[in-house]
Amino acid sequence: MSDRINHVPERIELRLPGGFQLPPFGIHQFLALMIVCVALWALGAVWLGLQGAQQWVGSWQGNLQLHVYLPVEKKDQLGDLKGRLSTIEGVDSVRYINRKEAALWMQNWLGDTSLDVDKFSSQLPESLELTLADERNDFIFSDIRDEAARFGASVNEDEIQLANAHELLQSIRQLVLFVSVILALAMAMIVSNTLRMILLARADEVHLMRLLGAKEWFVRMPFIMEGTLLGGGAALLGWLLLWPLVLGVSSWAGSLGIALSPFTLLLPLLFGGVLVGCLGAMIATAKLISPDSVDS
């Protein structure tokens, strides 16, 4: 008698109700896990790239500054130039930087303590530092160039390029955000199709559970758990795969003053993966047999 109770026939498969299976997953779950993992890894790499580009460009949004240089022989026109630059729309303030201050800044930037500041400052032009507003008109850089040219001064074109790069990065960020949403929907459909195949393969089991009085959410919950686990696991694996990429470019990024941090993407990736998996599972189980359709 005890042998009959403890013995399980070979054809009987022990598993949890619904769609959830304990690891190892089947081939369909494994493929879905890999596809979602690669997609999340690619998104994480793109966002890391934007993070590094933002650091390289610098924090321009709150304090956009531009420098204008006036030759020493035209020093007597410095006051007029400063006044003209101050009247340009979008320029908040104009500050004079004496040559010794500029030389000290250059010494600190180069890290050369043997630099003769007094001798070096005599070779520098007169400098004006312009602080620009966040919301500036499209022609502000042209206006600054025109005013500087009237006095024979020059504008730091590298800073203008960085400012334009910042505007470009904002556009790229919006585009990447849009692409991320599209990819999230695509990943949700992949998870949904995977779980839908499992659901169809177990249609008799689900129908029997409904006949026995199981509520719809009781049947759906294991599938939702599996989808959440697939999405969260793919996100965690994708985040771990970001580390070899970061370590591979760390020396090059360090030379540019860029410090990439995958930790900032851990929670967004996990949240996104769990959300994608849960959404896919809910879509897959949206048409379970309702109590009204079950014959009494």
Image: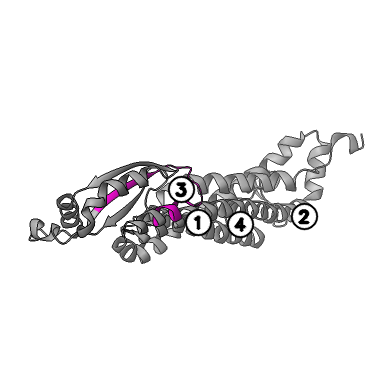
SS at badge 1:
helix
Q: Where does the magenta region start and end?
A: 127-145
Dot 2 or dot 1: first in sequence order is 1
Name the residue rendered at 46%, 48% in the picture: 266
Dot 1 or dot 3: first in sequence order is 1
Where is residue 208, by image quadrant? Answer: top right
SS at badge 3:
helix
Kind of residue at badge 2: Ala
Which residue is tagged 3?
266
Dot 2 or dot 3: first in sequence order is 2
Disc marking residue 168: 1
Kindly check if marks 1 and 4 are in contact, taking CB atoms under 8 A apart as contact.
no
287 or 10: nearer the viewer: 287
Q: How crowded is mark 2: few (under 14 residues within 10 Å), some or many (20 or more)?
A: few
Instruction: Give the mark toward the camera: 2 or 3.
Output: 3
Residue 270 locus on image (x, y percent): 52, 47
Spatial CA span between label 1 and label 4: 44 Å
Instruction: Give the mark toward the camera: 1 or 3.
Output: 1
Which residue is tagged 4?
25
Kindly check if marks 1 and 3 are in contact, taking CB atoms under 8 A apart as contact.
no
Would residue 87 be seen by someone viewing this image from the given angle?
yes
SS at badge 2:
helix
Spatial CA span between label 4 and label 3: 24 Å
Q: Number of marks in the image?
A: 4
